[in-house]
Amino acid sequence: MYSKILLPVDLNEQASWSKALPTALTLCRSFGASLHVVTVLPDVQMPMVGGFFPPDYASKAQEAVSEAQHEFIRDNVPDDIQVQSVIVEGSPWEAIIQASRKVDADLIVMASHTKRKFVDYVLGPNAEHVVHHSKVSVMIVR
């Protein structure tokens, strides 16, 4: 039923994956699917923001996140799961949807870990945006 499962993770926030990862691994094993671990970098190359960072900041950030994500995969994804590391830039929900298109995922498994900040009431949590805008199935794990 599923062949490519996308799992968004915030490497600085264990709540973003602690419950969703076991679910994604179970689904990968059940369907023989591959797992695509996605981490979103903020887009610092925008003209208004880019001037505040050193010229090589984006490449160094990409390299550091890539290394951290590979370590996350080594530590948390068993060897029997086919896994791919995906790093994208932008707003979290838009980048997650972009990544799902890029890898041609047919399921997104993600955690709902709302911190109930004021911004969540104004903009809505990322999981809600992904659910409303994704063209593929989304499983929210609480």
Image (cartoon, rainbow, N blue to C red):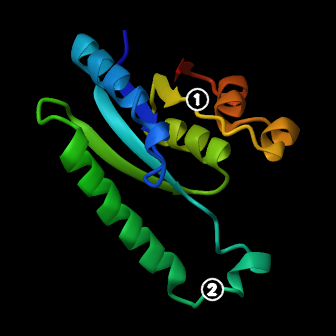
Q: Position of residue 8 (x, y in %)?
A: 47, 40
| Extreme residue toward the right, this view | 122
Q: Position of residue 130 (x, y in %)?
A: 65, 31
**What numbered label is drawn on residue 112?**
1
Q: Amino acid at mark 2?
A: Phe
**Residue 47, relative to residue 127: is it above or below?**
below
Pick whichever of labels 1 and 2 is earlier in the sequence: 2
**Residue 98, relative to residue 20: is it above or below?**
below
Mark 1 packing: few (<14 Cα in 10 Å), some, or many (20+)?
some
Q: Quadrant of residue 43?
A: bottom right
Q: Amino acid at mark 1?
A: Ser
Residue at 55% x, 21% y is 138
Closer to the camera in the image, 31 or 141? 141
Please give the residue where the numbered disc 2 appears in the rendered image. Answer: 53
- Secondary structure at badge 1 equals loop
Q: Quadrant of residue 132?
A: top right
Closer to the camera in the image, 47 or 60? 60
Instruction: Answer with left or right where residue 124 lies relative to residue 45.
Output: right
Instruction: Answer with left or right where residue 54 lies relative to residue 65.
Output: right
Instruction: Answer with left or right where residue 54 lies relative to residue 15.
Output: right
Q: Looking at the image, do the residues carrying marks 1 and 2 touch, with CB atoms under 8 Å apart?
A: no
Q: Position of residue 125 (x, y in %)?
A: 71, 36
